[in-house]
Image (cartoon, rainbow, N blue to C red):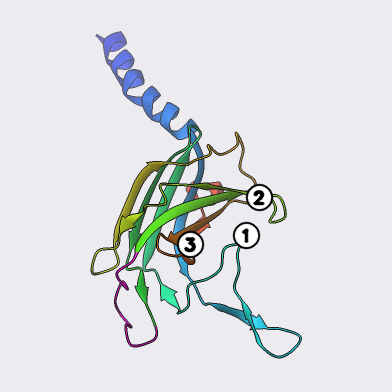
Amino acid sequence: MKSLSLALALAAFVPSLATADSVLVAFEGGIGVDPVAGVTSTGGPALNVVRGISPGGFTWQISRLSAQVQVDGRITVEGRGLLLTAGNVIGTNGGQRVFATLFCGPAATATAHSSSVAGVALEANGDFRIDDALTPAPPASCDSPVLLIVSAANGHWFAAGIPKNDAEDR
């Protein structure tokens, strides 16, 4: 009887280990875009371009973001409260659709791996869920990961994921 209990306990535990091992990279928390990153040498605004992706024209905030990318390229993203923080449409979703783009490696050589560029519609409160596959599939390891939430309308980024630190789970 003890052997059966142990076997059942192991059977229940082993699939969760396989799932944990299949995560390529995870993100917990998000940063909304500020389109201006500073001032250029000529005194004009320096756009907040990340990995070649231009920022949205207004500031955006995101209340919460959680994302996982599996080694096979599957991605799930849960976003909450992605809303405009400026202009006459402040506090709205701007009627936007968004998709996710993952970059691995240094900025100079990083390649974009995106979910469907048709995107998913933001709910009125800015909530969204992406459950898709990245194309092209990401590499087997992902150093210096950057996850951007991008407008399906114009390809500008609205929010970025904060990479989850494995040490936080210990």
* Residue 92 vertical position relative to residue 64 in the rendered view, above or below: below
* Residue 65 vertical position relative to residue 85 in the rendered view, above or below: above
Q: What residue is shown at x 64% (from left), y 82% (from top)?
A: 38
Taking 90 as reference, is 114 left or right? right
For disc 2, the marked residue is 110
Q: Are marks 3 and 2 in contact (CB under 8 Å)?
A: no
For disc 3, the marked residue is 155
How far apart are the alpha carbons under marks 3 and 1?
12 Å
Looking at the image, tell me whether mark 3 or mark 2 is earlier in sequence order.
2
- Residue 15 location in percent, x, y? 37, 25
Disc 1 marks which amino acid? Arg
Taking 78 as reference, is 145 left or right? right
Disc 3 marks which amino acid? Gly
* Residue 144 vertical position relative to residue 39 in the rendered view, above or below: above
* Residue 41 vertical position relative to residue 150 in the rendered view, above or below: below
For the stretch drawn in magenta, the main secondary structure is loop
How far apart are the alpha carbons under marks 3 and 2?
17 Å
Range of residues picked out in magenta:
86-96
- Residue 102 location in percent, x, y? 53, 50
Looking at the image, tell me whether mark 1 or mark 2 is earlier in sequence order.
1
- Residue 118 location in percent, x, y? 37, 52
- Membership of 78 in magenta stretch: no
Could you tell me which secondary element the residue under label 1 belongs to?
Answer: loop
Work out which residue is located at the far right of the displayed protein and give it.
41
Disc 2 marks which amino acid? Ala
Q: What residue is shown at x 70% (from left), y 91% (from top)?
A: 43
Q: Nearer the viewer, mark 3 or mark 1?
A: 3
Could you tell me which secondary element the residue under label 2 belongs to?
Answer: loop
- Residue 151 location in percent, x, y? 42, 63
Quarter of the picture containing the N terminus is top left
